[in-house]
Amino acid sequence: SPRRNAARVLRAMQLPKPILLEGSPGVGKTSLVSALAKAAGHNLVRINLSEQTDMMDLLGADLPADGGAAGEFRWADGAFLAALKNGDWVLLDELNLAPQPVLEGLNAALDHRAEVFVPELGETFRCP
């Protein structure tokens, strides 16, 4: 039932660890997380993963600078890194569709280390 599922997620939230929700499509996993984020006063960033997702999409990349000189590049944070920096809740939707390199890249954020190292920046970002 929705009430039981909400209680389970709330209980899991007592630990400072990521939560994996599994279930058939359309049963309300995303809606549940959205409602909990709203009730807790957190901004929720939903990132839809697919076979086409790569780590640049999540962490960022050096991109041509808007209004900059020819050949000038600036770092642009990806959705996951921007959410980490803002302290937002992150919902990685359709995690099962992500390619293996993306899953491996997310390991450090989702395991006991709870951090992401961005080699291009030479910085490590802690997951809140």
Image (cartoon, rainbow, N blue to C red):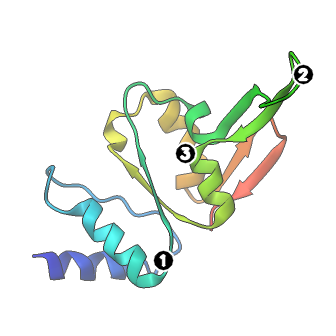
Quadrant of residue 70 within the rendered picture: top right
Give the spatial CA distance, label 1 vs label 2.
Answer: 48 Å
Q: Amino acid at mark 3?
A: Asn
* Residue plotted at (77% across, 31% down): 66
Q: Position of residue 16 (x, y in %)?
A: 53, 73
Q: Position of residue 43 (x, y in %)?
A: 50, 69
The residue that label 2 is drawn on is: 69
Asked which secondary structure carries label 1, the reply is: loop
* Residue plotted at (64% across, 41% down): 59
Give the spatial CA distance, label 3 vs label 2.
Answer: 37 Å
Relative to 1, say whether 87 is above or below.
Answer: above
Q: Amino acid at mark 2?
A: Ala
The residue that label 3 is drawn on is: 107
Q: Say which quadrant the N terminus sits in.
A: bottom left
Give whichever of discs 3 and 1 has the lower sequence position.
1
Q: Position of residue 69 (x, y in %)?
A: 90, 22
Give whichever of discs 3 and 2 has the lower sequence position.
2
